[in-house]
Amino acid sequence: MAHLSYPWMNQPASGHLPGTTARPAFLAYRLLYIGFVVLPIAAGLDKFAQMLAVWEQYLAPAVVRVLPVTPHHFMLAVGVLEMIAGVIVAFKPRIGAFVVAAWLCGIIANLLLAGGFYDVALRDLGLALGAVALGLLSREFTA
C-alpha cells in the first residue's frame, strides 16, 4: 500500500496509527494545521491593509495608555508577530500551535479589559482551544 508523503512534515499521510481510526484524526490535524498557518498570516497582513477591521478599536484603553507608540504602530507590530506565529506553525506545529494559543489568550485578556467585545473574546477562546488541539495532534502527526 502506497503512502502519500508530506515532505514538510516527514510523516506519511496515515500518521502513526494503522487503519481507518487514524484517518479522521489526521484530517482534523490537517484542517487545523492549514487554518493556523493561513489565518494568523492573513490577520497579520490585514493589520497593514485594514480591509477586515480597524484593528485599533479592539485595544483596551488601559493598554493604549501604557503603549510607548501609537495604537496604529502597535497594531502593525502585532501584525508582524501574527505572521511570524503562522510561519512557526508551518514549520514547527508542535511549538507554533501553543505560541498561537498563548497569543490568543493575550488577545482575550485585552478584549476583556476593553469591555464590549465579549463575543469576540468568546470566539478567540474557541480558536485558542483549536490551537491547543493542533498542538496535541501534532505530537501524533509530525516528526
Image: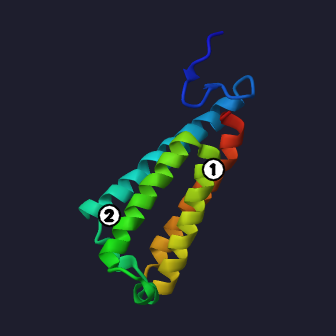
Q: Is residue 115 among what the camera can see?
A: no
Residue 22 in the image: above or below residue 88: above
Q: Regarding mark 1 in the picture, which secondary structure is present there?
A: helix
The residue lying toward the viewer, choosing from 73 and 11, is: 73
Say what amino acid the circle numbered 2 marks.
Answer: Lys
The residue lying toward the viewer, choosing from 22 and 80, is: 80
Q: What scheme was used to colour the molecule?
A: rainbow
Left or right: where does residue 98 sit relative to residue 76?
A: right
- Quadrant placement of the N terminus: top right
Callout 2–callout 1 Cβ contact below 8 Å: no
- Quadrant placement of the C terminus: top right
Give me the residue at 55% from left, 78% from top: 109
Percent position of residue 26, x then y: 63, 34
- Find the residue positioned furthest to the top: 1
Residue 111 shows which numbered tag? none
Residue 1 in the image: above or below residue 31: above
Left or right: where does residue 136 sit relative to residue 86?
A: right
- Disc 2: CA contacts within 10 A as few (<14), some (14-19) or many (>=20): many
- Disc 1: CA contacts within 10 A as few (<14), some (14-19) or many (>=20): some
List the residue tagged with mark 2.
Answer: 47
Say what amino acid the circle numbered 1 marks.
Answer: Ile
Residue 95 shows which numbered tag? 1
Which of the 4 image quarters holds residue 50?
A: bottom left
Percent position of residue 83, x then y: 42, 54
Give me the residue at 65% from left, 35% from top: 142
Q: Regarding mark 2 in the picture, which secondary structure is present there?
A: helix
Percent position of residue 120, x then y: 45, 71
